[in-house]
Amino acid sequence: RFQNGLAVGAVPVVLATQFRGGAGPQWGGRYLLLSGFLLAVVGMAVVFRPSAPKPVAMGMAALSAAVTVFGLVWVHERTHDVDRAIAAINRRPEPVIVSGIFHLAREGGASYRAPPNDNGKRWLTMTPAAGPATVADVLTRAGMTTFADIVVSGAPRRQYPGFEAGTTTHLRLFDGVDLEVTTWRAPS
């Protein structure tokens, strides 16, 4: 009983206090793993005890298998969708990719190759505190004359002082989330 109370009691504390940052998809409840494991062990001890009805035990086993398969399929699909989107971004001609989507560069981390074998791309994740004017200043001081800006589709277009917006293309990140990628150039 103490273990049950400890496992269940920790859940609201974790949900109320854990910093998730700007990466909700990656958070995934990782700080709930121990509570979940403890509750799963207690649940299995109850469901699979010798006196438990067999249909209940079989139903729980089938449900557990179904949840596991669903999770594996979801991770597979999401991983491949993100890989495809990052590959498309890396094929773009701009030397710098600017994004205010905090987890986007981290999602594409597997595609990063350090110099001299890199693809020439530099990723710049913009924080709300920095803003477009700061990014424009950094890019100008770095000698960059063109870059790609990424926003979630439907978000307002940012304005970068000293640069002019070019074409915007749409890119599917994963199911239900599309990106708009705009080319920005310094005037000639």
Image (cartoon, rainbow, N blue to C red):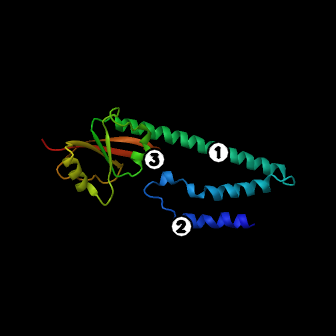
Q: Nearer the viewer, mark 1 or mark 3?
A: 1
Give me the residue at 86% from left, 52% from top. 50
Labelled disc at residue 176 = 3
Q: Position of residue 180 (x, y in %)?
A: 33, 45
Q: Nearer the viewer, mark 1 or mark 2?
A: 2
Outermost residue to the top: 117
Q: Quadrant of residue 107?
A: top left
N-terminal-most mark, 1 or 3 = 1
> What amino acid is found at the position of numbered circle 3 in the picture?
Gly
Query: Which residue is located at x 36 percent, y 37 percent?
Result: 114
> Which residue corresponds to mark 2?
16
Give x and y (percent) for residue 88: 37, 36
C-beta proximity under 8 Å, tags 1 and 3:
no
Task: Quarter of the image for the N terminus: give it.
Answer: bottom right
Q: Is residue 29 visible?
A: no
Of labels 2 and 3, earlier in sequence is: 2
Residue at image location 49% in from the left, 37% down from the top:
80
Whether residue 9 sits left or right of residue 24 in the image: it is right
Q: Which residue is mark 1?
A: 68
Q: Secondary structure at mark 3?
A: loop
Left or right: 76, with 56 as reference point: left
Per the model, the C-alpha gap separating discs 2 and 3 is 27 Å
- Few, some or many C-alpha atoms within 10 Å of disc 3 (few <14, some 14-19, many ≥20)? few
Per the model, the C-alpha gap separating discs 1 and 3 is: 23 Å
Q: Which mark is residue 138?
A: none
| Residue 30, quarter of the rendered image | bottom right
Q: Looking at the picture, does residue 24 appear above or below residue 121?
A: below
Quarter of the image where one finds residue 83:
top left
